[in-house]
Image (cartoon, rainbow, N blue to C red):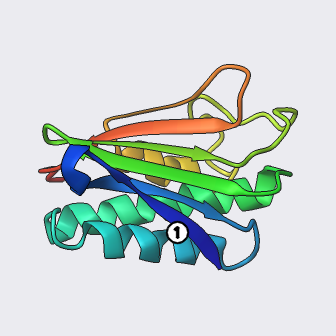
Amino acid sequence: MHQGLDVREAGGKRSGLDAEFTPNATAAEHARSAVRERFADSLPAFTLHELGTVVYELVDNGVRHGPGSAIHVRVTESGGVIHGEIDDDGDGTTSTPRKVVDPFSGLGFHIVDALVDRWEVREGTTIVSFEMGVDRLI
């Protein structure tokens, strides 16, 4: 199960999602469900599906490769741009590639790379951040 807090703007208006998930076999699906629930009324269906997929893949990667005690998911939307961060709370010793190089190393980062406008692993951390436009079309 996850613990979650909505990020709120002045006046109590919801502006994003800030949630923590236990790194287990169901964490990625719980994170995708939390994203869908939070943004269902504010994002186009296609964008919501892509955002859910990106969060699923990054949380799944954190479960598989990040030896942390929790996975933190933060997603906000502002000015037509979705900003996200996934932090597996690891110690930073498990490296994650900055760019996808080996086509046989798994599909998670390939999927993320295809669906977002920008993404990176913050130097010296286990935080993966990404940006994607709200009105994306393939």
| Residue 133 in view | no
> Residue 125 lies in what quarter of the image?
top right
Relative vertical location of residue 64 with respect to residue 93 in this rendering, above or below: below
- Is 37 or 118 nearer to us in this picture? 37
Question: Where does the image place residue 5, in percent across and percent down from the top left?
Answer: 48, 61
- Decide if residue 110 is on the left or right side of residue 26: left
Determine the residue positioned at 64% across, 72% down.
Answer: 27
Along the viewing direction, whichever of 118 and 78 lies nearer the viewer = 78
Name the residue at 66% across, 20% down.
Answer: 123
Q: Is residue 125 left or right of residue 131?
A: right
Q: Residue 71: name its quadrant.
A: bottom right
Q: Looking at the picture, does residue 91 appear above or below residue 68?
A: above
Q: Dot 1 corresponds to which residue? A: 31
Residue 134 appearing in the image? yes
Q: Nearer the viewer, residue 72 or 5?
A: 5
From the image, which quarter does the N terminus lie in? Answer: bottom right
Neighbour tally class for label 1: few under 14, some 14-19, many 20 plus, Cα within 10 Å: many
Residue lying farthest to the top in this orientation: 123
